[in-house]
Amino acid sequence: MLRTTTKILKVCIYGAIILAGVTFAVSNRGMVELTFYPLPYVVSMPLFLFFILTFAIGATLGWSIGRVKVGSYRRAHKQAIQRIEALENELGTMRTNQTVRSAVALPQR
């Protein structure tokens, strides 16, 4: 129930964001000139396209910085899992050896 409600809420929020973006794009179709100060270039593009490109560049940079940051944690997690598996195997071997020793106990005098 909670999972379905969360999905519906996400769809509504994403729909509202898309609707706002489409409304912004339709309302701001006018051309703007962008100049890059030290360079002699002038780019003419619709205002909404400038905002879409800015958003896309920001999202890409944020995603790639996040991937780099998470990479070290992933490596450490993978090494920890391998260490845990090795210790579990060692523990299983020790338990098996202990069981064999107790089964082959010397008879009492």
Image (cartoon, helix red, strand yellow):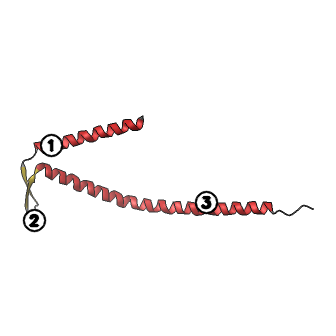
Q: Is residue 5 left or right of residue 83?
A: left
Q: Position of residue 3 (x, y in %)?
A: 41, 38
Q: Amino acid at mark 3?
A: Glu
Residue nearer the viewer, 87 or 65 = 87
Identity of the residue furthest to the right in this view:
109
Q: Residue at x 14, y 45 (%)?
A: 25
What x and y, as percent, mark residue 38?
Answer: 11, 64
Disc 2 and disc 1: Cα gap in Å?
Answer: 29 Å
Numbered disc in front, either 2 or 1: 1
- Say which residue appears at 53% left-offset and 63% top-offset: 82
Res. 39 image quadrant: bottom left
Question: Disc 2 versus disc 3: distance between alpha carbons?
Answer: 62 Å
**Of the numbered discs in the image, which one, if any, rests on residue 39?**
2
Instruction: Give the quadrant of the C terminus.
Output: bottom right
Say whether residue 46 is left or right of residue 99: left
Q: Is residue 68 above or below residue 49?
A: below
Q: Residue under label 1, please give it.
A: 24
Residue that appears at 52% across and 60% down: 81
